[in-house]
Image: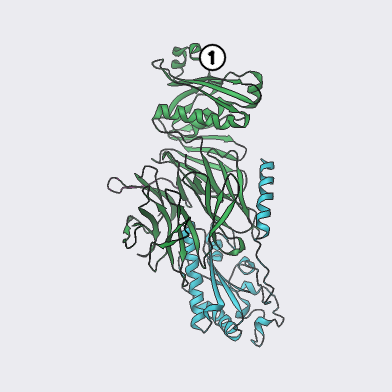
Protein backbone atom coordinates (compact mmCIF):
# COMPACT_ATOMS: atom_id res chain seq x y z
CA UNK A 1 0.00 0.00 0.00
CA UNK A 2 2.84 2.34 -0.66
CA UNK A 3 1.01 4.76 -2.88
CA UNK A 4 2.16 8.14 -1.79
CA UNK A 5 1.64 10.90 -4.23
CA UNK A 6 4.80 12.80 -4.90
CA UNK A 7 4.31 16.20 -6.34
CA UNK A 8 7.62 17.42 -7.62
CA UNK A 9 6.83 20.83 -8.95
CA UNK A 10 3.98 23.22 -9.21
CA UNK A 11 4.69 26.00 -11.64
CA UNK A 12 1.69 27.99 -12.66
CA UNK A 13 -0.82 25.66 -14.24
CA UNK A 14 1.61 22.82 -14.69
CA UNK A 15 1.72 20.29 -11.96
CA UNK A 16 3.67 17.04 -12.12
CA UNK A 17 2.42 14.28 -9.93
CA UNK A 18 3.27 10.67 -10.32
CA UNK A 19 1.95 7.64 -8.60
CA UNK A 20 3.22 4.16 -9.08
CA UNK A 21 0.46 1.71 -9.75
CA UNK A 22 0.69 -1.96 -10.33
CA UNK A 23 0.17 -1.42 -14.04
CA UNK A 24 -0.14 2.23 -14.85
CA UNK A 25 1.52 5.41 -13.67
CA UNK A 26 -0.75 8.41 -13.63
CA UNK A 27 1.00 11.68 -14.36
CA UNK A 28 -0.98 14.86 -14.11
CA UNK A 29 0.63 16.94 -16.84
CA UNK A 30 -1.66 19.92 -16.61
CA UNK A 31 -3.65 20.64 -13.47
CA UNK A 32 -6.45 22.99 -12.73
CA UNK A 33 -5.33 26.11 -10.86
CA UNK A 34 -8.60 26.39 -8.99
CA UNK A 35 -8.70 22.76 -7.86
CA UNK A 36 -10.78 22.39 -4.72
CA UNK A 37 -8.76 21.61 -1.57
CA UNK A 38 -10.15 18.58 0.23
CA UNK A 39 -8.85 16.47 3.12
CA UNK A 40 -9.55 12.74 3.06
CA UNK A 41 -8.61 11.66 6.57
CA UNK A 42 -7.39 8.04 6.91
CA UNK A 43 -10.36 5.93 7.93
CA UNK A 44 -10.11 4.34 11.33
CA UNK A 45 -9.95 0.61 10.96
CA UNK A 46 -9.64 -2.23 13.38
CA UNK A 47 -6.50 -4.18 12.56
CA UNK A 48 -8.12 -6.75 10.33
CA UNK A 49 -9.62 -4.16 8.03
CA UNK A 50 -6.59 -1.91 8.12
CA UNK A 51 -4.39 -4.66 6.77
CA UNK A 52 -6.64 -5.20 3.82
CA UNK A 53 -7.20 -1.86 2.19
CA UNK A 54 -6.61 1.89 2.48
CA UNK A 55 -9.99 3.29 1.52
CA UNK A 56 -9.12 6.93 2.20
CA UNK A 57 -5.98 6.75 0.04
CA UNK A 58 -7.92 5.50 -2.94
CA UNK A 59 -10.64 8.14 -2.52
CA UNK A 60 -7.94 10.78 -2.25
CA UNK A 61 -6.14 9.48 -5.36
CA UNK A 62 -9.37 9.39 -7.38
CA UNK A 63 -10.29 12.95 -6.51
CA UNK A 64 -6.78 14.23 -7.21
CA UNK A 65 -6.71 12.40 -10.50
CA UNK A 66 -9.80 14.20 -11.67
CA UNK A 67 -7.74 17.38 -11.57
CA UNK A 68 -10.68 19.17 -9.95
CA UNK A 69 -9.55 18.46 -6.41
CA UNK A 70 -6.35 18.97 -4.49
CA UNK A 71 -6.06 16.30 -1.83
CA UNK A 72 -4.33 17.32 1.37
CA UNK A 73 -1.21 15.30 2.14
CA UNK A 74 -1.59 13.10 5.21
CA UNK A 75 1.63 14.46 6.64
CA UNK A 76 -0.01 17.87 6.79
CA UNK A 77 -2.98 16.63 8.81
CA UNK A 78 -2.81 17.90 12.37
CA UNK A 79 -5.38 15.43 13.61
CA UNK A 80 -7.15 12.41 12.19
CA UNK A 81 -10.79 12.42 13.27
CA UNK A 82 -13.05 9.54 12.22
CA UNK A 83 -16.43 11.11 12.83
CA UNK A 84 -17.90 14.55 12.36
CA UNK A 85 -17.89 15.13 16.11
CA UNK A 86 -14.10 14.94 16.12
CA UNK A 87 -13.47 17.63 13.49
CA UNK A 88 -11.92 20.91 14.66
CA UNK A 89 -13.26 22.93 11.79
CA UNK A 90 -11.23 26.07 12.49
CA UNK A 91 -7.96 24.14 12.43
CA UNK A 92 -8.78 22.52 9.09
CA UNK A 93 -9.85 25.90 7.77
CA UNK A 94 -6.49 27.39 8.71
CA UNK A 95 -4.88 24.69 6.56
CA UNK A 96 -6.96 26.00 3.63
CA UNK A 97 -9.23 23.00 3.28
CA UNK A 98 -12.71 23.56 1.89
CA UNK A 99 -14.03 20.04 2.49
CA UNK A 100 -13.21 17.10 4.71
CA UNK A 101 -14.11 13.41 4.51
CA UNK A 102 -13.89 11.26 7.63
CA UNK A 103 -14.80 7.62 8.03
CA UNK A 104 -14.29 4.16 9.37
CA UNK A 105 -13.93 0.63 8.08
CA UNK A 106 -15.44 -2.01 10.36
CA UNK A 107 -15.36 -5.76 9.93
CA UNK A 108 -18.77 -7.40 9.64
CA UNK A 109 -17.80 -10.93 10.43
CA UNK A 110 -15.98 -13.12 7.97
CA UNK A 111 -14.58 -11.25 4.94
CA UNK A 112 -17.17 -8.50 5.05
CA UNK A 113 -16.73 -4.84 5.89
CA UNK A 114 -18.76 -1.73 6.47
CA UNK A 115 -17.39 1.56 5.17
CA UNK A 116 -18.97 4.50 6.97
CA UNK A 117 -18.08 8.00 5.84
CA UNK A 118 -19.15 11.62 6.13
CA UNK A 119 -18.43 14.66 4.00
CA UNK A 120 -18.37 18.11 5.62
CA UNK A 121 -18.13 21.62 4.31
CA UNK A 122 -15.42 23.14 6.47
CA UNK A 123 -16.54 26.73 5.93
CA UNK A 124 -20.02 26.31 7.38
CA UNK A 125 -19.56 23.01 9.27
CA UNK A 126 -22.42 21.53 7.24
CA UNK A 127 -22.65 17.77 6.88
CA UNK A 128 -23.16 17.14 3.16
CA UNK A 129 -23.06 13.34 3.08
CA UNK A 130 -23.25 10.46 5.52
CA UNK A 131 -23.24 6.96 4.07
CA UNK A 132 -22.52 3.37 4.84
CA UNK A 133 -21.41 0.91 2.15
CA UNK A 134 -20.78 -2.74 2.82
CA UNK A 135 -18.39 -4.81 0.75
CA UNK A 136 -16.45 -8.04 0.86
CA UNK A 137 -12.68 -7.83 0.73
CA UNK A 138 -12.27 -7.86 -3.07
CA UNK A 139 -15.12 -5.34 -3.27
CA UNK A 140 -13.38 -2.73 -1.09
CA UNK A 141 -11.70 -1.18 -4.11
CA UNK A 142 -14.98 -0.71 -5.97
CA UNK A 143 -16.65 0.56 -2.79
CA UNK A 144 -13.87 3.13 -2.37
CA UNK A 145 -14.39 4.35 -5.94
CA UNK A 146 -18.09 4.68 -5.08
CA UNK A 147 -17.21 6.85 -2.06
CA UNK A 148 -15.16 9.07 -4.40
CA UNK A 149 -18.05 9.17 -6.87
CA UNK A 150 -20.46 10.38 -4.17
CA UNK A 151 -18.08 13.05 -2.89
CA UNK A 152 -17.37 14.22 -6.45
CA UNK A 153 -21.06 14.47 -7.29
CA UNK A 154 -22.06 16.17 -4.04
CA UNK A 155 -19.50 18.94 -4.44
CA UNK A 156 -19.46 19.43 -8.22
CA UNK A 157 -22.96 18.36 -9.21
CA UNK A 158 -21.47 15.99 -11.79
CA UNK A 159 -21.87 12.25 -11.45
CA UNK A 160 -18.53 10.64 -10.63
CA UNK A 161 -17.06 8.05 -13.00
CA UNK A 162 -14.38 6.55 -10.76
CA UNK A 163 -16.22 3.25 -10.34
CA UNK A 164 -16.24 2.56 -14.07
CA UNK A 165 -14.06 0.54 -16.45
CA UNK A 166 -12.02 1.12 -19.56
CA UNK A 167 -11.24 -1.32 -22.37
CA UNK A 168 -8.09 -0.91 -24.44
CA UNK A 169 -5.69 -2.75 -26.72
CA UNK A 170 -2.19 -3.56 -25.49
CA UNK A 171 0.47 -4.64 -27.99
CA UNK A 172 3.49 -6.49 -26.65
CA UNK A 173 6.58 -7.90 -28.27
CA UNK A 174 8.58 -6.69 -31.22
CA UNK A 175 8.39 -7.35 -34.93
CA UNK A 176 7.62 -9.69 -36.45
CA UNK A 177 5.99 -11.35 -33.41
CA UNK A 178 3.50 -9.10 -31.76
CA UNK A 179 1.02 -10.09 -29.14
CA UNK A 180 -2.26 -8.19 -29.18
CA UNK A 181 -4.46 -8.10 -26.08
CA UNK A 182 -7.86 -6.68 -25.43
CA UNK A 183 -7.87 -5.60 -21.80
CA UNK A 184 -10.56 -4.35 -19.45
CA UNK A 185 -9.36 -2.46 -16.38
CA UNK A 186 -10.80 -0.15 -13.75
CA UNK A 187 -10.87 3.49 -14.81
CA UNK A 188 -7.71 4.10 -12.73
CA UNK A 189 -5.84 1.35 -14.62
CA UNK A 190 -6.05 -1.16 -11.78
CA UNK A 191 -7.43 -4.70 -12.06
CA UNK A 192 -6.55 -5.33 -15.70
CA UNK A 193 -8.05 -8.47 -17.19
CA UNK A 194 -7.17 -9.91 -20.57
CA UNK A 195 -10.43 -10.40 -22.44
CA UNK A 196 -8.89 -11.65 -25.67
CA UNK A 197 -5.36 -12.31 -26.85
CA UNK A 198 -4.09 -12.93 -30.37
CA UNK A 199 -0.99 -13.04 -32.51
CA UNK A 200 -2.87 -10.98 -35.10
CA UNK A 201 -4.26 -7.47 -34.63
CA UNK A 202 -7.22 -6.71 -32.37
CA UNK A 203 -8.86 -3.35 -32.72
CA UNK A 204 -11.82 -1.04 -32.16
CA UNK A 205 -13.30 -2.28 -28.86
CA UNK A 206 -16.83 -0.95 -28.33
CA UNK A 207 -18.99 -1.37 -25.22
CA UNK A 208 -22.58 -2.45 -25.44
CA UNK A 209 -24.84 0.13 -23.78
CA UNK A 210 -25.40 -2.18 -20.79
CA UNK A 211 -21.67 -2.69 -20.27
CA UNK A 212 -22.03 -6.48 -20.52
CA UNK A 213 -20.48 -7.04 -23.96
CA UNK A 214 -17.60 -5.81 -26.05
CA UNK A 215 -17.66 -5.74 -29.82
CA UNK A 216 -14.26 -5.65 -31.49
CA UNK A 217 -12.37 -6.47 -34.67
CA UNK A 218 -10.02 -9.45 -34.71
CA UNK A 219 -7.68 -10.41 -37.54
CA UNK A 220 -7.26 -14.01 -36.41
CA UNK A 221 -6.94 -16.05 -39.64
CA UNK A 222 -5.40 -12.87 -41.07
CA UNK A 223 -8.81 -11.58 -42.12
CA UNK A 224 -10.91 -9.04 -40.23
CA UNK A 225 -14.04 -10.20 -38.44
CA UNK A 226 -16.26 -8.46 -35.93
CA UNK A 227 -16.87 -10.34 -32.70
CA UNK A 228 -19.17 -9.75 -29.76
CA UNK A 229 -17.89 -11.10 -26.47
CA UNK A 230 -19.80 -11.33 -23.20
CA UNK A 231 -17.46 -10.33 -20.40
CA UNK A 232 -18.98 -12.36 -17.61
CA UNK A 233 -18.87 -15.69 -19.47
CA UNK A 234 -16.11 -15.06 -21.99
CA UNK A 235 -18.47 -16.43 -24.62
CA UNK A 236 -17.93 -14.82 -28.01
CA UNK A 237 -19.76 -14.77 -31.32
CA UNK A 238 -18.52 -13.81 -34.74
CA UNK A 239 -21.14 -11.41 -36.00
CA UNK A 240 -19.57 -10.29 -39.26
CA UNK A 241 -17.02 -12.05 -41.44
CA UNK A 242 -18.12 -10.93 -44.84
CA UNK A 243 -15.79 -10.81 -47.82
CA UNK A 244 -13.59 -7.72 -47.56
CA UNK A 245 -13.61 -5.23 -44.72
CA UNK A 246 -15.44 -5.89 -41.42
CA UNK A 247 -14.64 -2.97 -39.17
CA UNK A 248 -15.54 -0.20 -36.74
CA UNK A 249 -18.42 -1.74 -34.74
CA UNK A 250 -20.68 0.72 -32.90
CA UNK A 251 -23.64 -0.31 -30.74
CA UNK A 252 -27.04 1.25 -31.25
CA UNK A 253 -28.36 2.87 -28.06
CA UNK A 254 -30.83 -0.01 -27.55
CA UNK A 255 -28.02 -2.57 -27.88
CA UNK A 256 -29.85 -4.45 -30.62
CA UNK A 257 -27.88 -3.35 -33.64
CA UNK A 258 -24.31 -2.72 -34.66
CA UNK A 259 -23.24 -0.09 -37.15
CA UNK A 260 -20.31 -1.53 -39.13
CA UNK A 261 -17.99 -0.62 -41.94
CA UNK A 262 -18.14 -3.19 -44.74
CA UNK A 263 -16.79 -3.17 -48.26
CA UNK A 264 -18.10 -4.09 -51.64
CA UNK A 265 -16.12 -6.34 -53.94
CA UNK A 266 -14.21 -3.41 -55.37
CA UNK A 267 -13.14 -2.32 -51.91
CA UNK A 268 -15.49 0.57 -51.39
CA UNK A 269 -16.02 1.13 -47.66
CA UNK A 270 -19.54 2.08 -46.60
CA UNK A 271 -21.51 2.06 -43.38
CA UNK A 272 -24.12 -0.60 -42.71
CA UNK A 273 -26.38 -1.45 -39.81
CA UNK A 274 -26.57 -5.07 -38.71
CA UNK A 275 -29.57 -6.17 -36.66
CA UNK A 276 -28.09 -8.61 -34.15
CA UNK A 277 -31.38 -10.45 -33.68
CA UNK A 278 -32.57 -10.84 -37.27
CA UNK A 279 -29.14 -10.56 -38.96
CA UNK A 280 -30.76 -8.11 -41.38
CA UNK A 281 -28.21 -5.80 -42.97
CA UNK A 282 -29.11 -2.26 -44.02
CA UNK A 283 -26.81 -0.12 -46.09
CA UNK A 284 -26.58 3.43 -44.73
CA UNK A 285 -24.03 5.17 -46.97
CA UNK A 286 -23.27 4.69 -50.66
CA UNK A 287 -20.33 6.70 -51.85
CA UNK A 288 -17.07 5.88 -53.65
CA UNK A 289 -15.06 7.49 -50.83
CA UNK A 290 -14.08 5.85 -47.54
CA UNK A 291 -17.03 5.97 -45.13
CA UNK A 292 -16.16 4.61 -41.69
CA UNK A 293 -15.96 5.16 -37.92
CA UNK A 294 -19.71 5.35 -37.28
CA UNK A 295 -21.15 6.50 -33.94
CA UNK A 296 -24.85 6.59 -33.05
CA UNK A 297 -26.84 9.51 -31.79
CA UNK A 298 -28.65 8.80 -28.52
CA UNK A 299 -32.06 8.47 -30.18
CA UNK A 300 -30.71 5.94 -32.66
CA UNK A 301 -31.97 8.08 -35.52
CA UNK A 302 -28.64 9.18 -36.95
CA UNK A 303 -25.00 8.20 -37.32
CA UNK A 304 -21.94 10.40 -37.16
CA UNK A 305 -19.09 9.10 -39.33
CA UNK A 306 -15.86 9.86 -41.17
CA UNK A 307 -15.84 10.21 -44.95
CA UNK A 308 -13.29 11.39 -47.48
CA UNK A 309 -15.94 11.90 -50.16
CA UNK A 310 -14.87 15.54 -50.44
CA UNK A 311 -11.11 14.80 -50.54
CA UNK A 312 -9.64 14.45 -47.07
CA UNK A 313 -11.46 12.86 -44.15
CA UNK A 314 -14.23 14.97 -42.62
CA UNK A 315 -17.10 14.28 -40.24
CA UNK A 316 -20.66 13.85 -41.44
CA UNK A 317 -24.03 12.95 -40.00
CA UNK A 318 -26.66 10.86 -41.72
CA UNK A 319 -30.12 9.64 -40.73
CA UNK A 320 -30.49 5.90 -40.32
CA UNK A 321 -33.71 5.93 -42.33
CA UNK A 322 -33.00 5.00 -45.91
CA UNK A 323 -32.51 7.71 -48.48
CA UNK A 324 -31.18 10.33 -46.10
CA UNK A 325 -28.42 12.59 -47.43
CA UNK A 326 -25.36 13.05 -45.21
CA UNK A 327 -24.62 16.48 -43.85
CA UNK A 328 -21.01 17.61 -43.42
CA UNK A 329 -20.17 18.94 -39.93
CA UNK A 330 -16.45 19.80 -40.00
CA UNK A 331 -14.93 22.41 -42.29
CA UNK A 332 -11.89 23.59 -40.37
CA UNK A 333 -8.66 21.86 -41.46
CA UNK A 334 -7.93 19.04 -43.85
CA UNK A 335 -8.24 16.07 -41.47
CA UNK A 336 -11.14 15.54 -39.07
CA UNK A 337 -12.02 11.97 -38.21
CA UNK A 338 -13.42 9.42 -35.75
CA UNK A 339 -16.26 11.32 -34.11
CA UNK A 340 -17.44 10.45 -30.60
CA UNK A 341 -20.50 12.07 -29.05
CA UNK A 342 -20.43 13.35 -25.49
CA UNK A 343 -23.03 11.60 -23.29
CA UNK A 344 -25.27 14.71 -23.26
CA UNK A 345 -24.72 15.19 -27.01
CA UNK A 346 -23.56 18.76 -26.51
CA UNK A 347 -20.09 18.03 -27.89
CA UNK A 348 -18.38 15.95 -30.50
CA UNK A 349 -14.82 14.77 -29.82
CA UNK A 350 -12.70 13.81 -32.82
CA UNK A 351 -9.18 13.66 -34.21
CA UNK A 352 -7.95 16.69 -36.08
CA UNK A 353 -4.68 17.52 -37.78
CA UNK A 354 -2.94 20.64 -36.59
CA UNK A 355 0.67 21.69 -37.22
CA UNK A 356 1.36 18.27 -38.70
CA UNK A 357 0.20 16.50 -35.52
CA UNK A 358 -2.94 14.50 -34.84
CA UNK A 359 -4.78 15.93 -31.86
CA UNK A 360 -8.01 15.61 -29.94
CA UNK A 361 -10.52 18.35 -30.64
CA UNK A 362 -14.10 19.01 -29.64
CA UNK A 363 -16.89 20.71 -31.51
CA UNK A 364 -19.76 22.45 -29.80
CA UNK A 365 -22.95 20.97 -31.21
CA UNK A 366 -25.38 23.33 -29.52
CA UNK A 367 -23.94 26.70 -30.39
CA UNK A 368 -22.09 27.84 -33.47
CA UNK A 369 -20.02 24.73 -33.92
CA UNK A 370 -16.92 26.17 -32.27
CA UNK A 371 -13.91 23.87 -32.43
CA UNK A 372 -11.41 23.60 -29.58
CA UNK A 373 -8.20 21.61 -29.93
CA UNK A 374 -7.58 20.05 -26.50
CA UNK A 375 -4.22 18.31 -26.82
CA UNK A 376 -0.74 19.13 -28.08
CA UNK A 377 0.64 15.72 -29.07
CA UNK A 378 1.62 14.43 -32.48
CA UNK A 379 -0.21 11.11 -32.38
CA UNK A 380 -3.30 11.75 -30.27
CA UNK A 381 -6.12 9.54 -31.55
CA UNK A 382 -9.07 7.38 -30.45
CA UNK A 383 -10.94 9.73 -28.10
CA UNK A 384 -13.58 8.20 -25.83
CA UNK A 385 -15.78 10.09 -23.36
CA UNK A 386 -16.14 9.14 -19.71
CA UNK A 387 -19.79 8.24 -19.12
CA UNK A 388 -20.23 11.48 -17.15
CA UNK A 389 -18.82 13.51 -20.04
CA UNK A 390 -16.26 15.23 -17.79
CA UNK A 391 -13.18 13.62 -19.32
CA UNK A 392 -11.97 12.14 -22.58
CA UNK A 393 -9.54 9.23 -22.61
CA UNK A 394 -7.43 8.86 -25.75
CA UNK A 395 -4.35 7.15 -27.16
CA UNK A 396 -1.13 9.13 -27.38
CA UNK A 397 2.59 8.55 -27.72
CA UNK A 398 5.21 9.34 -25.15
CA UNK A 399 8.91 8.89 -26.02
CA UNK A 400 8.03 6.49 -28.82
CA UNK A 401 5.59 4.40 -26.79
CA UNK A 402 1.87 4.09 -27.05
CA UNK A 403 0.25 5.42 -23.88
CA UNK A 404 -3.24 6.33 -22.77
CA UNK A 405 -3.97 9.88 -21.72
CA UNK A 406 -6.85 11.85 -20.28
CA UNK A 407 -8.03 15.35 -20.92
CA UNK A 408 -10.97 17.06 -19.28
CA UNK A 409 -13.70 17.90 -21.76
CA UNK A 410 -12.85 21.59 -21.31
CA UNK A 411 -9.14 20.94 -21.90
CA UNK A 412 -8.06 22.29 -18.50
CA UNK A 413 -6.74 19.07 -16.98
CA UNK A 414 -4.42 16.62 -18.73
CA UNK A 415 -2.93 13.34 -17.56
CA UNK A 416 -0.89 10.48 -18.91
CA UNK A 417 -1.41 6.87 -17.95
CA UNK A 418 1.92 5.19 -18.51
CA UNK A 419 1.91 1.42 -18.61
CA UNK A 420 4.83 -0.59 -17.37
CA UNK A 421 4.76 -2.66 -20.53
CA UNK A 422 3.31 -2.71 -24.00
CA UNK A 423 1.91 -0.21 -26.42
CA UNK A 424 -1.53 0.91 -25.33
CA UNK A 425 -4.11 1.79 -27.96
CA UNK A 426 -7.76 2.52 -28.51
CA UNK A 427 -9.20 3.13 -25.06
CA UNK A 428 -12.97 2.80 -24.80
CA UNK A 429 -14.60 4.04 -21.61
CA UNK A 430 -17.42 1.81 -20.41
CA UNK A 431 -20.91 3.10 -19.61
CA UNK A 432 -21.95 3.55 -15.96
CA UNK B 1 -1.50 -9.52 -11.57
CA UNK B 2 0.75 -12.11 -13.17
CA UNK B 3 -1.69 -14.82 -12.20
CA UNK B 4 -4.66 -13.03 -13.75
CA UNK B 5 -2.70 -12.68 -16.97
CA UNK B 6 -1.68 -16.33 -16.97
CA UNK B 7 -5.22 -17.58 -16.53
CA UNK B 8 -6.57 -15.25 -19.14
CA UNK B 9 -3.83 -16.26 -21.53
CA UNK B 10 -4.63 -19.91 -21.16
CA UNK B 11 -8.25 -19.26 -21.99
CA UNK B 12 -7.41 -17.06 -24.93
CA UNK B 13 -4.79 -19.50 -26.11
CA UNK B 14 -7.33 -22.27 -26.29
CA UNK B 15 -9.66 -20.05 -28.25
CA UNK B 16 -6.89 -19.24 -30.65
CA UNK B 17 -5.65 -22.72 -31.40
CA UNK B 18 -8.45 -23.33 -33.82
CA UNK B 19 -7.89 -19.97 -35.44
CA UNK B 20 -4.24 -20.22 -36.44
CA UNK B 21 -3.51 -19.17 -40.00
CA UNK B 22 -3.09 -22.15 -42.25
CA UNK B 23 0.29 -22.80 -43.78
CA UNK B 24 0.56 -21.82 -47.39
CA UNK B 25 1.84 -25.18 -48.52
CA UNK B 26 -0.18 -25.64 -51.65
CA UNK B 27 2.00 -23.54 -53.87
CA UNK B 28 5.62 -22.93 -53.02
CA UNK B 29 6.58 -19.44 -53.92
CA UNK B 30 9.38 -17.30 -52.57
CA UNK B 31 8.50 -15.83 -49.22
CA UNK B 32 5.01 -17.26 -49.30
CA UNK B 33 3.47 -16.57 -45.95
CA UNK B 34 6.43 -14.50 -44.86
CA UNK B 35 4.82 -11.11 -44.72
CA UNK B 36 7.47 -8.80 -43.48
CA UNK B 37 10.74 -10.12 -44.80
CA UNK B 38 11.00 -7.62 -47.60
CA UNK B 39 10.00 -4.59 -45.69
CA UNK B 40 12.41 -5.34 -42.88
CA UNK B 41 15.26 -4.77 -45.23
CA UNK B 42 14.35 -1.23 -45.84
CA UNK B 43 13.53 -0.91 -49.51
CA UNK B 44 11.27 -2.27 -52.15
CA UNK B 45 13.84 -4.58 -53.68
CA UNK B 46 14.75 -6.15 -50.39
CA UNK B 47 12.17 -8.89 -50.46
CA UNK B 48 14.41 -10.72 -52.87
CA UNK B 49 16.86 -10.97 -49.99
CA UNK B 50 18.96 -13.55 -51.74
CA UNK B 51 16.37 -16.31 -51.66
CA UNK B 52 16.71 -18.66 -54.60
CA UNK B 53 13.56 -19.45 -56.49
CA UNK B 54 14.73 -23.04 -57.09
CA UNK B 55 12.33 -23.73 -59.90
CA UNK B 56 9.13 -23.86 -57.91
CA UNK B 57 5.74 -23.96 -59.52
CA UNK B 58 5.23 -20.26 -59.20
CA UNK B 59 8.03 -19.28 -61.49
CA UNK B 60 8.41 -22.12 -63.93
CA UNK B 61 9.31 -20.93 -67.36
CA UNK B 62 9.43 -17.31 -66.25
CA UNK B 63 13.16 -16.97 -66.43
CA UNK B 64 13.07 -15.10 -63.13
CA UNK B 65 16.01 -14.96 -60.77
CA UNK B 66 16.40 -14.07 -57.13
CA UNK B 67 16.49 -10.36 -57.83
CA UNK B 68 13.92 -10.25 -60.62
CA UNK B 69 10.60 -8.49 -60.26
CA UNK B 70 8.80 -11.74 -59.49
CA UNK B 71 10.89 -12.20 -56.38
CA UNK B 72 9.83 -8.78 -55.16
CA UNK B 73 6.51 -8.86 -53.39
CA UNK B 74 6.09 -5.50 -51.73
CA UNK B 75 4.86 -2.33 -53.38
CA UNK B 76 5.45 0.91 -51.50
CA UNK B 77 3.32 4.04 -51.58
CA UNK B 78 3.65 7.74 -50.90
CA UNK B 79 1.95 9.28 -47.88
CA UNK B 80 -1.81 9.34 -48.21
CA UNK B 81 -1.53 7.98 -51.77
CA UNK B 82 -2.75 4.82 -53.40
CA UNK B 83 -1.28 5.30 -56.88
CA UNK B 84 1.28 2.69 -57.93
CA UNK B 85 4.53 4.49 -58.64
CA UNK B 86 6.27 3.79 -62.01
CA UNK B 87 9.18 2.00 -60.35
CA UNK B 88 6.81 -0.76 -59.24
CA UNK B 89 5.24 -1.34 -62.66
CA UNK B 90 7.59 -4.23 -63.48
CA UNK B 91 6.72 -6.00 -60.23
CA UNK B 92 3.02 -5.75 -61.01
CA UNK B 93 3.58 -6.94 -64.60
CA UNK B 94 5.73 -9.89 -63.55
CA UNK B 95 3.14 -11.11 -61.08
CA UNK B 96 0.33 -10.47 -63.57
CA UNK B 97 2.12 -12.74 -66.08
CA UNK B 98 2.68 -15.35 -63.40
CA UNK B 99 -0.98 -15.34 -62.40
CA UNK B 100 -2.36 -15.33 -65.94
CA UNK B 101 0.05 -18.13 -66.82
CA UNK B 102 -1.19 -20.15 -63.84
CA UNK B 103 -4.93 -19.67 -63.53
CA UNK B 104 -4.90 -21.96 -60.49
CA UNK B 105 -2.72 -19.54 -58.54
CA UNK B 106 -4.29 -17.26 -55.99
CA UNK B 107 -2.93 -14.09 -54.50
CA UNK B 108 -3.89 -12.09 -51.41
CA UNK B 109 -3.10 -8.40 -51.52
CA UNK B 110 -2.42 -7.05 -48.03
CA UNK B 111 -2.77 -3.28 -47.77
CA UNK B 112 -0.98 -1.37 -45.02
CA UNK B 113 -0.49 2.23 -43.93
CA UNK B 114 1.86 4.08 -41.63
CA UNK B 115 0.75 4.86 -38.09
CA UNK B 116 -0.41 8.41 -38.72
CA UNK B 117 -4.10 9.18 -38.55
CA UNK B 118 -7.05 7.31 -37.10
CA UNK B 119 -6.99 3.52 -37.03
CA UNK B 120 -10.21 2.77 -38.82
CA UNK B 121 -9.70 5.39 -41.50
CA UNK B 122 -6.29 3.82 -42.10
CA UNK B 123 -8.04 0.51 -42.72
CA UNK B 124 -9.82 2.31 -45.56
CA UNK B 125 -6.54 3.67 -46.94
CA UNK B 126 -4.88 0.24 -46.78
CA UNK B 127 -7.83 -1.28 -48.60
CA UNK B 128 -7.63 1.42 -51.24
CA UNK B 129 -3.96 0.55 -51.84
CA UNK B 130 -4.70 -3.16 -52.06
CA UNK B 131 -7.48 -2.36 -54.54
CA UNK B 132 -5.12 -0.25 -56.66
CA UNK B 133 -2.82 -3.26 -57.04
CA UNK B 134 -5.80 -5.54 -57.66
CA UNK B 135 -7.06 -3.28 -60.47
CA UNK B 136 -3.58 -3.08 -62.02
CA UNK B 137 -3.30 -6.88 -62.01
CA UNK B 138 -6.78 -7.29 -63.49
CA UNK B 139 -6.00 -4.75 -66.21
CA UNK B 140 -3.18 -7.08 -67.22
CA UNK B 141 -5.52 -10.03 -67.52
CA UNK B 142 -5.52 -11.58 -64.06
CA UNK B 143 -8.90 -13.15 -63.27
CA UNK B 144 -10.89 -11.54 -60.49
CA UNK B 145 -11.27 -14.96 -58.86
CA UNK B 146 -7.51 -15.24 -58.37
CA UNK B 147 -7.31 -12.14 -56.19
CA UNK B 148 -8.45 -11.21 -52.70
CA UNK B 149 -7.62 -8.15 -50.65
CA UNK B 150 -7.26 -7.47 -46.97
CA UNK B 151 -6.37 -4.26 -45.17
CA UNK B 152 -4.42 -4.21 -41.93
CA UNK B 153 -4.31 -0.41 -41.86
CA UNK B 154 -1.59 0.59 -39.41
CA UNK B 155 -2.01 -2.54 -37.29
CA UNK B 156 0.78 -4.68 -38.82
CA UNK B 157 3.76 -2.41 -39.29
CA UNK B 158 6.83 -3.80 -41.07
CA UNK B 159 9.11 -1.39 -39.24
CA UNK B 160 8.90 0.32 -35.85
CA UNK B 161 9.51 3.99 -35.31
CA UNK B 162 7.90 7.42 -35.37
CA UNK B 163 9.80 8.73 -38.36
CA UNK B 164 9.64 8.81 -42.14
CA UNK B 165 12.16 5.96 -42.48
CA UNK B 166 9.81 3.60 -40.68
CA UNK B 167 6.67 5.09 -42.20
CA UNK B 168 7.95 4.61 -45.76
CA UNK B 169 8.45 0.90 -45.08
CA UNK B 170 4.95 0.58 -43.66
CA UNK B 171 2.98 2.20 -46.49
CA UNK B 172 2.83 -0.91 -48.59
CA UNK B 173 0.90 -3.68 -50.26
CA UNK B 174 2.28 -7.17 -49.78
CA UNK B 175 1.65 -9.71 -52.52
CA UNK B 176 1.02 -13.07 -50.89
CA UNK B 177 0.58 -16.25 -52.92
CA UNK B 178 -1.64 -18.71 -51.18
CA UNK B 179 -4.30 -21.34 -51.43
**Position of residue B81 in the picture relative to residue A331 (left or right):** right
Where is residue A380 drawn, in percent x and y? 47, 50
Residue drawn at point x = 66 percent, y = 45 percent:
B5
Q: Nearer the viewer, residue B45 or A275?
A: A275
Q: Chain of mark 1?
A: A
Count of marks overlaid on the render:
1
Q: Residue A270 in the image: x percent, y percent?
A: 42, 64
Q: Which quarter of the figure is the N terminus of chain A placed in? A: top right
Identify the residue at the far right of this view.
B54
Seen as rendered, the residue at the extreme front is A278
The span shown in magenta is: A366-377
From the rendered image, report the letter of the chain displayed in cyan: B
Residue A399 seen in the current view? no
- Can residue A32 be seen? yes
Q: Main secondary structure of the magenta part?
A: loop
Residue B115 is situated, as x and y percent measured from the top left of the image, at 52, 58
Quarter of the image holding residue A80?
top right
Q: Is residue A219 above or below residue B87?
A: above
Amino acid sequence: MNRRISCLAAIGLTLFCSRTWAELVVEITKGQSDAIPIAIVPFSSPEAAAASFDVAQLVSDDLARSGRFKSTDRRDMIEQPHTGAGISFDDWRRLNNDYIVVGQVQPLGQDRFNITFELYNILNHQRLLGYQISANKPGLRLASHQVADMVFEKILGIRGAFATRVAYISVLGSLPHKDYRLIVADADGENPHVVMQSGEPLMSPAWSPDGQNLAYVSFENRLPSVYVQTLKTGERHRVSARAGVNQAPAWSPDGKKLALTLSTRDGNLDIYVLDLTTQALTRITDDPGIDTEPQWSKDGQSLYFTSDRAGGPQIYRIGTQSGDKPRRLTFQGSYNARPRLSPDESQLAFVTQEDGGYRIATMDLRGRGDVQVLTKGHFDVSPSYAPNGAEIIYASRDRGRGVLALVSADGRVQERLVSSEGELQEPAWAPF
Amino acid sequence: MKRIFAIALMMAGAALLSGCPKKHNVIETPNAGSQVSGANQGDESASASGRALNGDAGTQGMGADATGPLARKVIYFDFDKSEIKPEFADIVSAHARNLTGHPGFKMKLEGNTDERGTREYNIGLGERRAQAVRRALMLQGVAESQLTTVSFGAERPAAEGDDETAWAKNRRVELVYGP
